[in-house]
Image: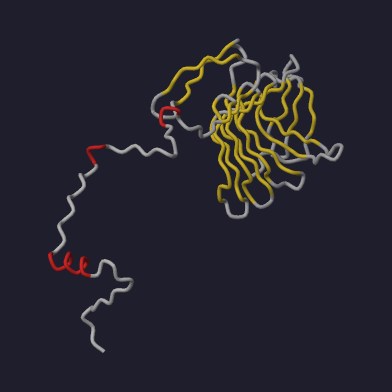
Amino acid sequence: MRLFLVPLILLICSGSDGQCRTYKISAKGDTINCTDINGLKQRLWAVHVDPLRGEPGYEEEGSFVNGKKENVWRRFNLMGDLIAIENYRWGNKNGKCLYYNLMGLEHEESWKALNPAKAVDTIDVPDPKFPDKYEKVIVKNEGNSLKHGNWKYYNPAYGTVLKTETYVLDELQTDKPDSDHKIDSAIILVDSASVKPLEKAKPKPKEVEEFEKKNKNKKKITVRDGKTG
């Protein structure tokens, strides 16, 4: 559901709201699009972007803190259809972000924002073999977000998952065989304790031995099976 409605009226603060140098009032009476005395965007904003050079226009709604996007932002096409829900921290994508087309959810992304106040940041990374165990990893902060977590691609018409990718600190994880468990395809390792010793061959009945001896050199042997007719 849309948070803000047009038309919007641009106002210059003259004491009614000392925290904003400029702001707008929505049709609902909400104060939005606040710019402070330092020129930084603050609080709730509604942004309109016109189509340009073949790129479709859009509108988005969310919050700014000191000129940087923060928390949940929603984006709509110019027809009013929801096309994205993104989460931000320190102006960078953080956590789960969802993207839609007219049929439904198209794909989701997972991001990890780094604290811009730190030259390096420490992130807890789960051990792939032991999900409840975490390892602290120090990451150089280059001022952007890292792909971190599951990325899923959907069939929007049915909501089924077509593909899943997993990233850890911007690195795509692949199913690589463990070198400690490689087995030559021509060799099968078997636990000797599970193998039963071969049983000794039972001696043939005396009648069978005499029959085989009597017909040893004959090309064709007629055997009666007890059937009649």
For residue 110, above or below residue 196? above
From the viewer's side, name the closer residue of 112 and 196: 196
From the viewer's side, name the closer residue of 225 and 7: 225
Q: Quadrant of the C terminus?
A: bottom left
For residue 59, above or below residue 228? above
- Residue 36 lies in what quarter of the image? top right
**72 with respect to 138 (left or right):** right
- Residue 72 lies in what quarter of the image? top right
Q: Name the residue located 61 percent from the left edge and 50 percent from the top edge.
A: 155
**192 with respect to 3 (left or right):** left
Q: Residue furthest left?
A: 206
For residue 229, above or below residue 147? below
Residue 182 on image: x %, y %: 43, 32
Q: Residue furthest bottom?
A: 229
How many marks are shown on the rendered structure?
A: 0
For residue 193, above or below residue 15? below
Q: How is the image coloured?
A: secondary structure
Q: Quadrant of the N terminus?
A: top right
Q: Residue furthest front?
A: 217
Residue 76 on image: x %, y %: 71, 42
- Residue 5 lies in what quarter of the image? top right
Q: Name the residue located 43 percent from the left edge and 26 percent from the top edge.
A: 127
Residue 163 on image: x %, y %: 58, 44
Residue 98 on image: x %, y %: 61, 39
From the viewer's side, name the closer residue of 111 and 9: 111
